[in-house]
Amino acid sequence: MIKIIRNILLIAISIYAFNVHSDNSTSRIDWDKLEKSNNSDLFSIKSLKCTLGKGSVGLWKSGSLKIEADNWNTTIYYDSIDIESGSARIIGNQGSGNAVVLTTGIGITFIEKTGIGNLTFTTVFNSKNKSGQFYAVSSRHIDSLGDLLPSQYHGTCDAWE
């Protein structure tokens, strides 16, 4: 679990750094081609409503990692999604804020940094279930007064009007 979270973080930071520091226009993705090749409307959606539920949380007690099943049961909204500028607005149960938007062929990833420095990564996959909803996963990297609480939750997203 820890390796997975670390790898996701390293990949996201690498993609972001490459896109921010690259002057080469070939590093830009041809979104029209990508949308057509994936036959998906995900990259044109400007607002998403994501419902997340089942997952797991990691707890370090006395230096040992214990992973427990958890259920978040929350709804997060992403609004004003702008793929070109790499930004969006996030609205959740703790208020609202800004998110960095990263895109790849697998979907859209939103990165939120909270006011106290915790990070949340939510990827909306460019793949739908039988009901037409996009699959989603959210990884939260939380340090609560010295108690480390990494967690990951799964769910779905729909276009939000």
Image (cartoon, rainbow, N blue to C red):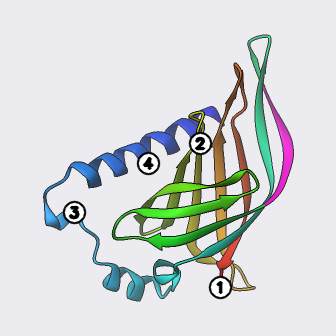
Q: Mark 3 and mark 1: span between their CA atoms?
A: 32 Å
Give the SS element for disc 2.
loop
Task: Name the residue tied to disc 1.
Answer: 161
For the residues bearing labels 4 and 1, Cβ distance under 8 angstroms:
no
Query: Residues in magenta?
Result: 66-74
Q: Residue at x 51, y 60 (%)?
A: 109
Q: Amino acid at mark 3?
A: Ser
* Distance in Å between CA atoms under marks 2 and 3: 29 Å
| Residue behind mark 4 | 12
Between marks 2 and 3 in the image, the one whose residue lies nearer the viewer: 2
Task: Please tell me whether residue 95 is drawn above or below residue 80 in the rendered image.
Answer: above
Please check the rendered image and state whether residue 43 is part of the magenta-colored stretch, yes or no.
Answer: no
Splitting the image into 4 quarters, where does residue 148 fall? top right
* C-alpha gap between disc 1 and disc 2: 25 Å
Circle 2 is placed at which residue position? 114
Q: Which residue is mark 3?
A: 27
Q: Nearer the viewer, mark 3 or mark 1?
A: 1
Find the distance from the CA under tag 4 to the CA under tag 1.
28 Å
